[in-house]
Amino acid sequence: MQSLIINKYSFLAYTFLVVVCSMSAMALEKNRKFVISGPPGAGKSTLINFLAQEGILTIPEVYATVIREAISNGTDKTLSKDKTALYSSMIKKQLEWEDQLPVGSIAFLDRSIVDILLFISSYEVTLPEHILQKIGNVDYDLVFHLQSLPEPFYSNEMKNRDEYMRCAREEGIKMAQGLQQKYKEYHIPSIDVPYDTTENMAQFIKNKVAQFIDTNNK
């Protein structure tokens, strides 16, 4: 079985949260999972990579890994035609990664099971019972919602080239709204991340995480 493709956190990054939140080691017996969600192009992967470079524990988006593995073992054509097989593989891999988190972890996820369930709702997909049983109770501490690229960031050249960028933005807004609603259905607290530089968005998220852990460990 493939080991978890995960970015290990450094002592320095771990200490950041411990010091800011004034927590003891015992306060971290429960894993803390924080999701970064949003439509394509919102900057999720860039943000996750930025956090990983700081030495913080992260889990990448599962789709790319599932497709890469399918290409390597020759099942990619099957997955491209069979959405049930694709999404079942994504859920199994996502759960595998989350189960492999070290005890007491503070981890940031590029999407989660909830995102996958939203994508499934766009197709006529019925998950097998054994996959549904694996999902169980979706358990994440917070979700950070990134938004579509703000209108001012679309240049006139991009707007006038064709209708693609306009349509892409509209679809991004719809997806962002759909994701927010899906997380509400699972009663997962959410925070909207104001659009900014990657560094500033990362700092915003870390501050909110520190506040959350501090509040929930008093």
Image (cartoon, rainbow, N blue to C red):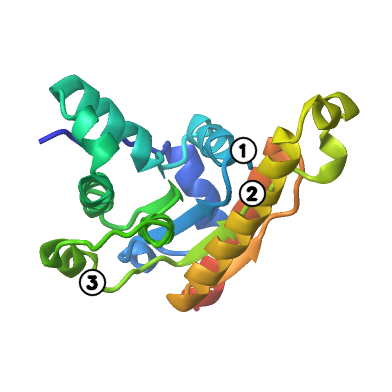
How many other residues sit within 10 Å of disc 3, few (<14), some (14-19) or many (≥20)?
A: few
Q: Mark 2 near mark 1, Cβ–Cβ under 8 Å?
A: yes
User: In this picture, is 133 found above or below 42?
Assistant: below
Q: Which residue is mark 3?
A: 136
Element under label 3? loop
Q: State whether residue 183 appears in this view.
A: yes
Q: CA distance from mark 2 to mark 3?
A: 29 Å
Mark closer to the observer (2, 1):
2
Q: Which residue is mark 2?
A: 172
- For image coordinates 28% across by 73% down, the residue present is 137
Relative to 116, is 38 on the left or the right?
Answer: right
- Quarter occupied by the N terminus: top left
Residue 62 lies in quadrant: top left
Tag shown at residue 41? 1
Q: CA distance from mark 1 to mark 3?
A: 30 Å
Mark closer to the observer (2, 3):
2
Relative to 139, is 69 on the left or the right?
Answer: left
In the foreground, 209 or 70: 70
In the foreground, 10 or 196: 196
In the foreground, 14 or 89: 89
